[in-house]
Image (cartoon, helix red, strand yellow):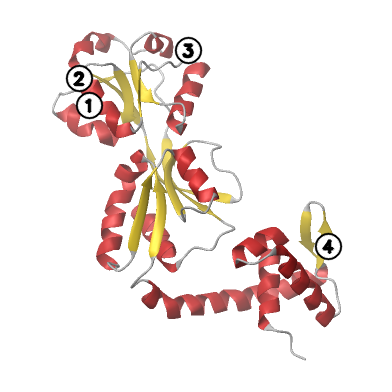
Amino acid sequence: MPVPYDYYRIFYYVAKYSSFTHAAAALHGSQPNVTRTINLLEQELGCRLFERSHRGVALTPEGERLFAHVKIMQEQMQAAEYELSSRRSLHSGQVAIGASETALHGLLLPVLRDFKRRYPGVRLQITNHSTPQAIGALRSGLVELAVVCTSCGEVAPPLSERRLRPFRDVLVAGPDYAYLLDSPLTYVQLARLPLIGLGPDSSTYGFYAQLFAEHEAELHPDVQTATTDQILPLVRYGLGLGFVPEDFAREALAKQEVIQLELADPPPQRYISLVKDKTRPLSVAAIEMERMLREASG
């Protein structure tokens, strides 16, 4: 009796993720059903395909040989399904994205404009989050993609990160602080001045708290904002100094509404990154959005 194709499809996902649990999530099924199918496949083929342990599962030599063939078959089937369904799927549907303020203005907005022009029937659900909130929404399955600002170590499996565009922050102040232009500031000096910044629930706050600590200073913003784009207006009105992405400050600097202050040790580069959950398959619309984001990043 021929082995059902579905047995091989389930085998492919268990082998791909080395986990019955992750395979069940990817297939939108239950772990007991996945386990039962693999047991039936092993009975049909007359050999063990996986070694089970408390750490997960690993392919046996027989499983490795089978996977080499099934992988080709499954990828060809997925490519065929995508080719047949993409035109239809991109006429409707929805893609949900969690985005931080800096990522939204620094990269995502022009991509959203181009996407909507190409696929007007696809609805866009954009939620404005801090980076930790966007990553939390991704883990919970509330969004398919997160476009956020990251530094090292913020994204852990099963999430994956693709860096799209680097950016740097600049330190800006109102004209009343022009006396600080005389020499580069240290972080110890900066900690004694009125600072404007994001709150502790943001990754930017954690980034600067660590940076200040590395320079034997403590970060205590005098004014805390909810989003990055609120910092510059407060700086313009003389409420303190603030770090903002260079792109955010360019126009205000050109108009001499604010001044850029020099630091003895400027902040390191950060990144606008695309984050997704490897255990959850993306919709066709989300796949296309991911492709366009990668293309926009060069």
Q: Residue at x 55, y 42 (%)?
A: 155
Category of crowding for the residue at label 3, using alpha-carbon neighbours closer than 10 angstroms: few (below 14), some (14–19), many (at least 20): some
Q: Secondary structure at mark 3?
A: loop
Asked if 297 appears above or below 51 in the picture, the reply is: above
Q: Which residue bears the numbered disc 1?
A: 233
Q: Earlier in the sequence, mark 3 or mark 2?
A: 3
Q: Quadrant of residue 236?
A: top left
Where does the image place residue 291, in percent across and percent down from the top left? 40, 61
Q: Is residue 192 left or right of residue 239?
A: right
Question: On the image, numbered disc 4 is attached to which residue?
Answer: 51
- Position of 75 with respect to 215 (left or right) is right
Q: Position of residue 10 (x, y in %)?
A: 68, 72
Q: CA distance from mark 1 to mark 4?
A: 60 Å
Q: CA distance from mark 4 to mark 3?
A: 52 Å
- Numbered label attached to residue 237: 2
Front tag of 1 and 4 = 1
Which quadrant of the view contains residue 265? Answer: top left
Q: Residue at x 77, y 91 (%)?
A: 1
| Quarter of the rendering containing residue 18 | bottom right
Residue at the image point whose x is 66% and y is 59% from the top? 22
- Which of the marked residues, 4 or 2, is nearer the chain's N terminus? 4
Q: Is residue 160 left or right of residue 33?
A: left
Mark 1–mark 2 contact, CB under 8 Å? Answer: yes
**Secondary structure category for the residue under label 4:** strand
Q: Residues within 10 Å of mark 4 (few under 14, many from 20)?
A: few
Name the residue at 47% across, 56% down: 144
Q: Position of residue 128 (x, y in %)?
A: 37, 43
